[in-house]
DNA sequence: TCCTTTACTGGACAATGTCCATTATAATTA
DNA sequence: TAATTATAATGGACATTGTCCAGTAAAGGA
């Protein structure tokens, strides 16, 4: 059980860290796409064959909303829909060439943002930051049954 | 300079951690207030005498939007506006008694959410998580000039 | 005083997200 | 097999959230 003081410090971290990441996310708008549009594109690009429902579930988004975003991406020729052979109700989503290019650009920008975030920190502290965050990741999300 | 692999791991952490916190934030709706309304209330309650502009700046919100939220809180008798003696354009915002009660409730819920988040983790790992996050906090946000 | 800036606010609107109903197909059960 | 139930995708209608601009009042200079 964590003490109240410890909880408060974690909450402080949460506030400042999410604020910081929020600022970075706003810059996704460089591309002219909204945050959710980018998320959907990245999600589709990160998997070999997703259906709209899977995208919605993975991103915890409303199915209807997701459908609209996907259709917008299709209209913009960033994504194509293909028939699924297993389930005629379902579609398989793939990036087009320009979708893939946009994916690469956003992915690259995201990497640069993180590099920029830590750019003022000396190398040794950067490593320490990296270790802290991956430690936190492991404790929170990895083999949860093994705790 | 962090390697690509390290950057990717940090981005993984960011995604999962913000998703997790996002889920927790949705539960603020228990109170019947939106996330931004809660943020404004918490911001006002955490400082002794803030003006609407200061709230907007601190939360990085549009002034007009902030104004509307504050006025809603005033209508609900959670916040009162007082004249500033230094600047007649500006208002000083204070919580009412019931505003303070709501503040306490949200604050308490936020604490419980963090406790719940770590509840399945054994005590020693919880400490380690705490240390990781505060280390990250210090590196990222503390005495930035000293790095 | 005159000009510029700032704090707050309302109107109008844009973007984002939610809910419900419909259609088509699958899966399950009688 | 036939009937029933569940699921995938989507559109319509709507609610919520957030942005932009303009106006008023007060400060703060030059």
Image (cartoon, coloured by chain):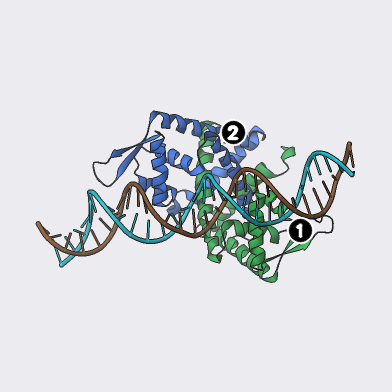
Chain colours: A blue, B green, C cyan, D brown
The quarter of the displayed image where residue B34 is located: bottom right
Q: Secondary structure at mark 2?
A: helix
The answer to whether residue A111 shows anywhere in this view is yes
The quarter of the displayed image where residue A82 is located: top left
Residue bearing the label numbered 2: A115
Q: Along the line of sight, which residue is nearer the eye, B75 or C26?
A: B75
Q: Position of residue A32 (x, y in %)?
A: 52, 36
Q: Position of residue A113 (x, y in %)?
A: 58, 35
Q: Along the line of sight, which residue is nearer the eye, B101 or B110?
A: B101
Number of residues whose C-alpha sits closer than 10 Å to that of mark 1, classed few (under 14), some (14–19) or many (20 or more): some
**Which mark, by number, is residue B78?**
none
Report, in whole angstroms, how far the alpha carbon at label 2 lies from the one at label 1.
Answer: 41 Å
Q: Secondary structure at mark 1?
A: strand
Q: Is residue B8 left or right of residue B140?
A: left
- Residue at coordinates 52% horizontally, 61% vertically from top-left? B27
- Residue at coordinates 42% horizontally, 43% vertically from top-left? A69
The answer to whether residue A5 shows anywhere in this view is no
**Total label count?**
2
- Residue at coordinates 50% horizontally, 34% vertically from top-left? A106
- Say which of marks 2 and 1 sits in front: 1
Number of residues whose C-alpha sits closer than 10 Å to that of mark 2, classed few (under 14), some (14–19) or many (20 or more): some
The quarter of the displayed image where residue D2 is located: bottom left
Q: Along the line of sight, which residue is nearer the eye, B41 or D29?
A: D29
Q: Chain of mark 1?
A: B
The quarter of the image holding the N terminus of chain A is: bottom right
Q: Position of residue A64 (x, y in %)?
A: 39, 51
**Which mark, by number, is residue B91?**
1
The reply to whether discs 2 and 1 touch (Cβ–Cβ < 8 Å) is no
Q: Is residue A117 left or right of residue C20?
A: right
Q: Report whether mark 2 lies on the same chain as mark 1.
A: no
Q: What is the residue that sits farthest to the bottom in this orientation?
A: B97
Q: Is residue A55 left or right of residue B54?
A: left
């Amino acid at each position: 059980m964590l003490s109240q003081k410890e909880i408060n410090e974690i909450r402080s971290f949460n506030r400042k860290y999410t604020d910081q990441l929020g600022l970075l996310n706003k810059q996704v708008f460089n591309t002219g796409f909204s945050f959710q549009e980018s998320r959907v594109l990245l999600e589709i690009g990160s998997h070999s064959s997703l259906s709209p429902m899977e995208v919605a579930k993975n991103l915890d988004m409303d199915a209807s909303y997701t459908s609209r975003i996907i259709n917008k991406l299709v209209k913009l020729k960033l994504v194509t829909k293909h028939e699924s052979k297993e389930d005629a109700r379902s579609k398989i989503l793939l990036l087009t060439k320009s979708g893939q290019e946009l994916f690469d650009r956003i992915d690259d920008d995201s990497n640069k943002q993180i590099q920029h975030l830590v750019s003022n920190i000396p190398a040794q502290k950067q490593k320490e930051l990296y270790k802290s965050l991956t430690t936190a990741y492991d404790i929170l999300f990895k083999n949860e049954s093994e705790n």
